[in-house]
Every structure is written in structure tokens, then in C-alpha cells.
Image (cartoon, rainbow, N blue to C red):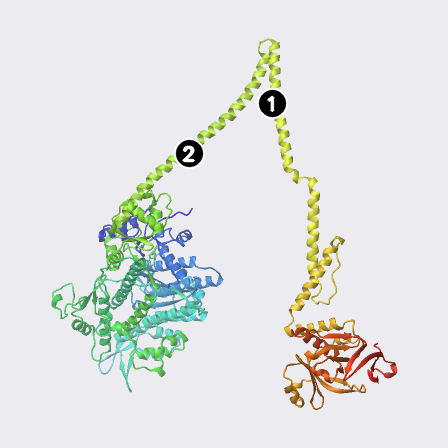
Amino acid sequence: MEVKTSLLDNMIGVGDMVLLEPLTEDSFLENLKKRFDHNEIYTYIGSVVISLNPYRSLPIYTPDKVEEYRNRNFYELSPHIYALADEAYRSLRDQDKDQCILITGESGAGKTEASKLVMSYVAAVCGKGQEVNKVKEQLLQSNPVLEAFGNAKTVRNDNSSRFGKYMDIEFDFKGDPLGGVISNYLLEKSRVVKQPRGERNFHIFYQLLSGASDDTLKKLKLERDFSKYNYLSLDSATVSGLDDAANFRTVRNAMQIVGFMEDEMQSVLELVAAVLKLGNIEFKPESRCNGMDESRIKDKNDLKEMCELLGTEQSVLERAFSYRTVEAKMEKVSTTLNVAQAYYARDALAKNLYSRLFSWLVTRINESIKAQAKTRHKVMGVLDIYGFEIFEDNSFEQFIINYCNEKLQQIFIELTLREEQEEYIREGIEWTNIEYFNNAVICDLIENNQNGILAMLDEECLRPGTVTDETFLDKLNTICADHQHFESRLSKNSKFLNDHSLPHNCFRIQHYAGKVLYRVEGFVDKNNDLLYRDLSQAMYKANHSLIKQLFPEGNPAKVNLKRPPTAGFQFKASVGTLMSNLQSKNPNYIRCIKPNDKKASHVFNGSLVCHQARYLGLMENVRVRRAGYAFRQAYEPCLERYKMLCKKTWPHWKGRARQGVEVLMTDLQVPAEEFSYGRSKIFIRNPRTLFFLEEKRKQCLEDLATLIQKIYKGWKCRSHFLLLKKSQVVVASWFRRYAVRLLSKLLLWLPIPESFARKLLRKLKYQKKCEEAVTTIAAFWHGTQVRREYRKFFRANAGKKIYNFTIQRIMQKYFLGLKSKLPSMSPIDKTWPARPYSFLDGVHAELRRIFHLWRCKKYRSQFTEEKKAVYEEKLEASELFKDKKALYPSSVRQPFKGDYLEISKNPKYQKLSSAVDEKILLADVVNKINRANGKGSSRLFLLTKKNVVLADQKTGQLKANVPLADLASVSTSTQTDGFFALKLKEGSASAVKGDFLLSSDHLIEIITKLHRIGSMAADREKLNIDISDEFLVQFKQDKVCVKFIQGSPKNGNSVSCKRKNNRLLEVSVPASS
Ligand SMILES: Nc1ncnc2c1ncn2[C@@H]1O[C@H](COP(=O)(O)OP(=O)(O)O)[C@@H](O)[C@H]1O
Ligand SMILES: [Mg+2]
């Protein structure tokens, strides 16, 4: 039996914050802490998962756990990230809803780990197979590559992602992965040139120097020593627990799996080496005659090596570090750079090189993992992006990141409320308006195209004249002064004039998650993100295909005087795309929280967690979720869980689940305002109602447990007792036997009179014999019974069985053998296999007959209608003439063509064919025998359904037209000649001229056709066919006898006809050979 479990079982604290009672920040934190202390790092807010970083490995990600959560309902088991992944995957696979998984939280809270857990869960539960596994492997291996280039050790996290990542995994209709698309956001490129104390540059630099072979390093002109490179900070170059050398091998391997070519990997490493070299280039001032300082490169060795790596000309790059060319319309003006400007240019180049390399890597990975099939995909997006950042010193980056989080909150509100509303409508529950804070107004403050902060920053950057961070702040102070979420000391709004927590060079925004103070320093510069054109042109000139690709704007053929889009503009655009992408999907949230700042396990720092809970808007989240009803459950599981609380529903409820729940709630007297009945779910307004039910259930379960224990104990004692009783019987019988034996021995020894003893002994012996006799009789009886039962298996019956078996085998063999030896399907094939056994004689002959009939039937069934008509005609001919007329055998081979003349096509006979209005069934040339002398003359003979027509052969002139109705009979001889007489009915109109005596080569066909027409016409009687060697014909008034005689050989082979006298016409026919 399947065991129904629930989130509510063995719950530590509450598994779903929605059930928190009372809901305050303190109770919220206390619940989190309680669960965390019991290793419960996951807690729900409805369908949102809060995840606390345990900073140690917990045994909750095993394959067994995957199986446990697979295909289970979300609230069935205790909270887990797998439950969310499973819900999302199944909804994608079974309901065709695209999904997105939004993972937010601050650095080190466990976002990246969470995203990997989701991916690995989906990989474990989706389809298998060679092709699918390859796709999965490529998708999973894209992670180590991106982490090597995009992650770094920070004070918060040894493997902190320094970019935002969104990955769409695409599935086919079965839920098998097809491929993916990765988008990256805002790589923290400033890290390339400078790292805060206690932090490192991106992993790849250290991995390359520690893990590459000596040979590779030599080729890249690098040394293993980190301290040789200005861009690598030394204070935390090695991180405990991080094996850079081993990771380098992992990354190379992953790149191979993802599909990077050997030369591509080489190019990538060359670029990484070039960035390191670039950091070592230093500048010194050189005074010029005009009193200005101009920068010069101190030691050109690094520059030389770098140029060799990238295939650039040294002088070009050297010039780009000393001069800057400004192009305005037609003019080009070169100005020299001072040392500070040269360093700025160098760092800008390094940052650009690295960040463009990173973007290229993403594009390249996308090329590899792109789904091949063009069919519609289902998509699961996984977003791993920075959460809100509130530092002491917040700059442009934090501003941008927080803007992104505002947008995510917008989506959250919109989709959660929408989902809630849709569920109410679906369930037929009245919609109660939900009060919540909508942060759209803050988004507008930042992104509005006219007077948003980003738009104004862009405006400043593009404005001619001197532009500084201060002028930007001035602008904000005038334009945003009245916005209720904008605060600045010098804004027109005098409210903040005396606010000393607000320095002069800062502005503050009241984000939905809290107030953040931004220092304007660097805003303009970072937004401009300028790389001097001389540098990009120098890069484009490099003899290195990858670099050329990375700096397309350096192509002199494509000089574009327009400024490249600002960083803010680009980010806003990509956030816009991301948002519309997310909006089209079903969202799933994972909110990651860091329990302490020390990366320590088992430490829960209340104030730190409280801070995060606030800026993640978690309380807000709970409030929105339970604004209407805190808890909902489908009727079936609800009844299943609480049915023991009411006698009417326990142990089985026969009716529908909803009615059961209604009975239950009435019986328990739960106040009506505490719940509503939806179509498929019950909605419970307050958590306390749920806990009331849970408490009752717990009590009831205890009572039930006592009852079960009671019954079990009773059963156990009783079975023990029965066993004892059975043993007692056995022991007693054995004892009696033993006692009797002992007694008989004793009797012989006892000093009692001998006669008495003997008598007793005899009696005992007799008794024993009787007992033995009983045993023997019983044994025989049993034997007989058994024999009778088993007689059917005895040898006496075997003969019949063997006989039957043999016969069956022979028949089987016979039928199978016959099947393989059947003759061909031709009806005239006379062969038939020999019969193997004489007892099969009858069967064999019958089978032959049946087979023949069957193949004839098959043969006939192939006939077309025309062919069938031809054969019918042939059959009729055979019935009429076979064995009656000697001409017949020679006609069998002749096809009955019918129309031998094609009258209608012959222009000569046009008149004739128009005179005959019926379809012509037969047209032939015949000999008409002259009645006077027996000579023949040619005539056209036409036969239609109604008439026989004779016409002149040369002119086609009509000679006679005899309706078939006037025809009395046809006469012909028994011999090989073609003579026949058409005899007319006496008194008919045609009879005036007398009968016709004709001769034709196609006599058999003509007469058969005439006969057929007669037999098919309903209004006429059958035509008589008279076959004899003497018959009478009526010539005008005379009746003449036509007589056929055997001709003598001297007459040759032809038939001759002579009028002998008035009454006789003699036809001599050559003897048939
Ligand atoms: N579920 C987890 N179980 C064990 N350790 C974890 C878990 N989540 C995070 N960690 C630890 O925390 C560190 C930081 O997590 P990470 O996902 O990189 O944070 P983020 O991406 O949010 O900056 C990881 O390197 C890992 O050591
Ligand atoms: Mg991360």
C-alpha cells in the first residue's frame, strides 16, 4: 500500500512560512533558525523555496533522495530543492508549460550550487540514451568552463560568480534535453586589473600558471611565479581547499567535451597570457618642450612578448599607449597621453580584452550546445544572478544590480498575484483584493526613458562640455527631487538638507528591499566604458583571428563616429529582454540566504539573516501569499489525512471526497468564515485552523496507536497460548507411549502372581497388535486411494496417449509439408504432391480439390469486367459447339475480337455507320451465297443488339437490315466449314426475300454472339441453333435443302458449293485432317 505523507509530518517549526502563526519578523527568523539547527536548510513560502547555505555537505543529494522526490507532489515531502525541480520539470513535460527557475541571494548564499542542483536533478530524472547523455554532459560541462573564467575568490565566497547567468535548457516533447542557450550579464571586469584586499583575480589566471605544463608556459611566454604579474594580487593567491592545477585539467577536459578545438583553446590561453603581460607594462613621464608630460613605456620587453603572442606590431601598440586620436567629422586630431592616461588606457584594454573573451566563450559554448532539431522546444530557464547588494560603499555596479532585482520583484509580484487570482477563478472562490506594495514606481524612477536615472546618466555622458559625476548628481537633484523614493542632500526637496547620514556626493534610493546609498563617483566613467579607438584599431590589426573577431569596431573600413551604446543602456536592454523572456514562463523561486559571514557551518547569525530576509522581501512574500487564504489542499488528500477525526468518515468514506470533507468540517464545528470550498480544493484562511486539525489528528493517531497495540498484544498472547496447547498434546502422547512400555517391563519384574501378570501382558500385547493392525489397514487404504487417484498416470493408459500424440504429430508434419510443397497457382497446373500415408488418401484428394477450387477462384477474381465477358462468351461457344461441330477446336485459340473492320474509323463506311444507330458488336466480311448458283460474293456483316445488317463491301451501301426479332433460327453443319443459314420467321417483314446463306471465317463467334444477344434480351425467346449436315432454307418460294458432303481430295482444300437442282444445294467440305 502506498503511504501518503505530507509536508506536515514530523515538521520542525513550520515547513511552510505561510503557516507561521503569528507572523512577525521574529517568529520568521526563529522558525528559520530552528529548522537550520535541525539540518533543515529548506523552507517554503508557498511554492517559493528558501535555502540556507549549510557550508558543509549534507547527505540530502544522494540518488536515493532523487528517487524519493521523483514524481511526488510538492507538499507531500519535507521541503527540498528537488521538490521544486521536480514540480517544474513535470509541469514542463506533462503540461507543456515553459518554466523558469529564479535563484536570487547575495554572494555566497548558494545560488550557483542551487542552480547546479536543479540541473543535476533534471539530468537525473529526464530520459536516457547515447544522444541525450551527450547533450546532458555538454550542458553540465559548460559550468566548469564559465566558472574558471567568470568566478573568483572574494571575501564572501571562494568561488564567487562575478557575472549573472541565465541558461535556457531546451527539451523535446518527451522531456529529453535537446540543448541550451546561455546569456551572461555584467561581468565584473574591473577585477581583471584590481582586486580588493583578501580577494583574487579570476580563477583561470591562477589555474593556468599552476596547472599548465612547462612547455605550454614557455609557448605562452609565461612564468609559473604569481608574483611576476602585477594584475595578480598576492595576499590570497592560493586558497585552501582549491586545487588550481587540478582544476586547470578539469577545465581543459570540460572545454574538450563542450566541443572546443585544440587551436581555439590555444587562442584562448594566448589571450589570457596577453592580459597578464599587459598588466606588466609600465609607464614613465617624459617632459616635452611645451612643458607637458608625455608617457613612455618603461621596459619594452613585456610589450614585445605580448605583441608576439597576439601577432601585433609593437610600434602600433606603443603609439596607441602614447597618443589618442580624436576624429570629428572630417578632422583627425592627435593628442598625447600623460602617464595616468596611459595607465587608464592600458587597464581599459585589459578589461575589454578579458570581458570580450568571456562573451566570446559564452557564444562559443552556445554554438556547441545549441539544440539541433528545429521542432518546437519546451524550455526551462535557470537564472543565477546577484541578489540585492547593500554595501557601505555602493557604486554603479550595485545600482545596476539592484535595478535588476527591482525588475525581478516586479515579475514576482505580477506572477504570484496572477497565479493566485487564476487559482481563485479556477476554483470558483470569490476574489478578495490583496494589499501589497507595488515597486513599479521604483522601476520607473530608474528606467523611465525621459527622466529616469539611467536616461539622465546617458544624457550626461553624451552631452558636450565638461561632464563629471557631480554634474550628473546636480541633474538628478533637479529632476528627481520630488520622487518619493529618491533622496539627496542637495535636492530641491529641502527635507534632506539636514540629513547627515546622506553625504553630499551621494544619492539614496528607497528600494523595495531597503534604502541604499550610492556614491556617484565613477558613474559617468563606468557608464561610458570607453576604449580609445587607437587601441581597438591596434587590436584589429593583430595577426590573430580571435582578437580580430573581438574588436570589430577597430576595422578602419567601418569607422563609426557614433558612440557605442553606454553600459547602462546595454544593461537596461538586456534586462528588458530577460524580463519578457521570464514573463512568458512559469516562474519557480529559490531564495538563497547566507547564515553567517564566516563560511562556517552550524552558525546562524540572526541579524545577518534578518538583513537578507528584509532585502529579499521575504515577509512581503509571505503576506502576498496568505493575503487570501493561507493554505489550500485538494479534497482527496485532505480527506485521507483527517478522516479519522469523524466517525462518519472513518475508516472509509463511500461518497465523493468533497462531501466527505464537508461532513468532516461540519462535524468538527470549524467556523464557516475560516474556510471556503473550491471546485477541487478546500481553502483555509488561517494557519491556526490547520493546526487545530493537525492537533486533533495527532491525538486521534495516538488513540489509534493504542488500539492497534492492544489488538497486537492480544493476538500475540493468543498465538503463544495455542502453540503451548499443541505442544502439550504431543508431549502427552509421547509420555503415554513411554509409560506403557515401562509398565510392561515393570509387570514382569513385579512380585505379582505369574498367571495374572501373563494375562495382563497378553492383553497388552493384543492391544499393541490391534494398534499395529489399524496402522497397516490405514496404510493400505491410503495406498488404494492414492493408486486410484494416480491411475490415469499409469502405463496402461499410455498407449492411447502415445497413439494420439503420434497421429497429431503426423498430421502436423503432413500439413506443414504440404504447405511447403503446394503446386503453382496456375489453374491448369495438374501436379499435386504424392500422399505420404495411405490412411490420408481421402483427405489428400479432398485437399487437392479444395486447393484447385480456391486457386481457380483466385484466378477468376483477378479478371476485369471486359475479360470476364470475353471468357463468358468463350464458355458459351464451348457449350454450343464443343463435340458438335468440327470447326470448334480451331476457334478456341482465336480471340473474339468482334469488330474486325473498325467501321466507324473508315471514312468509306461513314454513311453506313451513321445508318446503324446501335453499338456495333461484330463487324466482319462474310460470303453471301448466291441462291441461284451457289457462288459467293463478299458482304459486310454487322451485328448490333437489335439487328443484323448486310452491306456492300466496296461502297458500304446497305443491302439488308434484319431485326433480330425476325430471326427464327441459325443452321450450320457439323463439319469444319464456315457456312451458316439465317432462317427468318415465316410471315415476318424480312422473310419476303428469303433466308440468308452465308459463310464466314468467324462462324463460331458470329453464332455465339447471336445466341448471347438472344439469351440476354428479355423480350425475345432464345435463338435456336441447329447443327446438322442437312437442313432446309427458304429461297423466295422454294425450299432448298443444303447438304454437306465430304469433298474428294481433288477438290483441294477449299470448300465448294454447287446448286445441284431446284431442291438441292451441295456443299463439299474437305475432310478434316
Ligand atoms: N547546498 C549546499 N550544500 C553544501 N554547501 C553549499 C551549498 N550551497 C552552497 N554551499 C557552499 O557555499 C559556497 C558558495 O556557494 P555559491 O553557490 O557559489 O554561492 P553564490 O553563487 O550564491 O555566490 C559553495 O562553494 C559551497 O561550498
Ligand atoms: Mg554564484
Within 10 angstroms of label 2, few (less than 14), some, or many (20 or more) residues?
A: few
**Ligand 2 located in image quadrant:** bottom left
For image coordinates 73% across by 54% down, the residue present is: 840
Q: Is residue 42 something one can see in this rendering?
A: no
**Type of amino acid at the residue the image marks with label 1:** Glu
Quadrant location of residue 467? bottom left
Q: Is residue 81 above or below residue 654?
A: below
Would you name the residue on which mark 1 appears? Answer: 771
Q: In which quarter of the image is the C terminus?
A: bottom right
Asked whether mark 2 lies closer than 8 Å to ligand 1, one says no
Q: In this view, does 229 lie to the left or right of 722?
A: left
Within 10 angstroms of label 1, few (less than 14), some, or many (20 or more) residues?
A: few
Q: Is residue 697 left or right of residue 960?
A: left
- Labelled disc at residue 715: 2
For image coordinates 30% across by 41% down, the residue present is: 699
For image coordinates 52% across by 26% down, the residue present is: 730
Nearest the eye: 199 or 293: 199
Secondary element under disc 2, as helix, strand or loop, is helix
For image coordinates 37% across by 79% down, the residue present is: 541
- x and y, in percent, of residue 144 in the image: 39, 62
- x and y, in percent, of residue 672 in the image: 25, 50
Nearest the eye: 1050 or 880: 880
